[in-house]
Amino acid sequence: MRATSSRTVLAVCLIAGSPFRAPSPAFAAESASAPAPTFEELMNLKYSGLGSAGAVKLVDGRYENARKHRSVTFVRDFRIIGDLNGDGRDDALVLLAVSHGGSGTYNYVAVVGRKGGAASNLSTAPLGDRVQVRDARIDSGRIWVNVLRAGPEDAMCCPGELTTLSWELKGGKLHAVPTGAKPERLSLAAIAGTDWVLGSWAWDEPVADSIDITFAVSGDQVAGHAACNRYFATATDGSQPGDVTIGGAGSSRMACPEPQMAAEARFLARLATVRKYSFMGGQLALSWTEGDKVGTMLFARRPTKP
């Protein structure tokens, strides 16, 4: 059984240690009957606070205004669960991407709770232009988002600064809270120590549940499980943030059923052509180039054992 699903990349519920007073038993029973907003609700909801886009109603995760060259997209598979206002009910944190037809994409975090039993956008806050989310959580009534963004010396195309942003929901609005996090630079070392699991060959091509492919960085090597065999290869950071060169992979030589062998051959061929690593909605994105073909493989963190 796969440790993660391409359709449920992130679902976090962290309520231990909350500073809020525990709800009464009667209120707790009412809260239990009102679950956190579902993906279906979140993808078909009205959101406000989206800069010049104002307020928009998503349908199946998307809004588009062709006349104004404007679109708003729900970042698929991203939903963080936790209680943000101390009412004993789980709220949902989602990502929205706003495009105005140019090269920039303005990303926002939005909090959705329930009012009168119905899902409602409680507040929205900007992340910035082309800011990438590495991971996020709700902890002790606060939102914590680890991001990759352009630093003072970076071009917008090539963000290289890693930092942490945080918000609190007070008075019905999100307020930024200092984190004290010291910015770091993007490097292979920054993504080391995590076991990443391949969830999608491409944005609309999920990996079969029977296929287990992993990717991990350790020092100047990458290694993991390639559907059948263990593999390893050298990896070197490039001159621009996120640029990478991966050498030819070595592997063990076990034989497996044909679906696993085919997936392994496909992965190792793609791995040798990876030229860039970045993040998409909490997933690690390995982008490859082969001739005039380009693509991106998406990996989720393997859940840690309790």
Image (cartoon, rainbow, N blue to C red):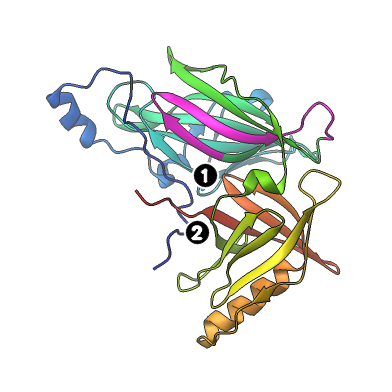
For disc 2, the neighbor class at 10 Å (few under 14, some 14 to 19, many from 20) is: many
Asked where in the image residue 36 lies, by quadrant, the reply is: top left
Quadrant the N terminus occupies: bottom left
Residue for badge 2 = 6
Name the spot of residue 48 as percent of width and height, x first: 54, 26
Identify the image quadrant of residue 228.
bottom right
Indicate which disc, 2 or 1, sits on the residue closer to the N terminus: 2
Is-magenta flag for residue 76? no
Give the camera-side residue of 72 and 233: 233
Q: Is residue 113 left or right of residue 30?
A: right
Q: Quadrant of residue 11?
A: top left
10 Å crowding of disc 1: few (<14), some (14-19), many (20+) = some
Q: Residue at coordinates 48% horizontally, 55% vertically from top-left? A: 302
Of labels 2 and 1, the one closer to you:
2
Magenta region: 135-155
**Is residue 172 placed above or below 209 in the rendered structure?**
above
* Contact between labelled residues 1 and 2, with CB atoms less than 8 Å apart: no
Task: Report the residue at 64% width, 55% height from top.
Answer: 217
Q: Percent x, y for residue 270?
A: 71, 69
Task: Please tell me which residue is depicted at 86% across the width and 69% down the height of the picture.
Answer: 291
283 is higher (above) or lower (below) than 111: below
Q: Nearer the viewer, residue 300 or 64?
A: 300
Residue 28's spot in the image, x, y percent? 19, 28
Amino acid on which disc 1 is placed: Val
In the picture of the structure, the residue carrying the numbered disc 1 is: 59
Q: How far is mark 2 from mark 1, CA to CA?
A: 21 Å
Residue 7 percent coordinates (x, y): 47, 56
Main secondary structure along the magenta-highlighted residues: strand
- Identify which amino acid the numbered label 2 is placed on: Ser
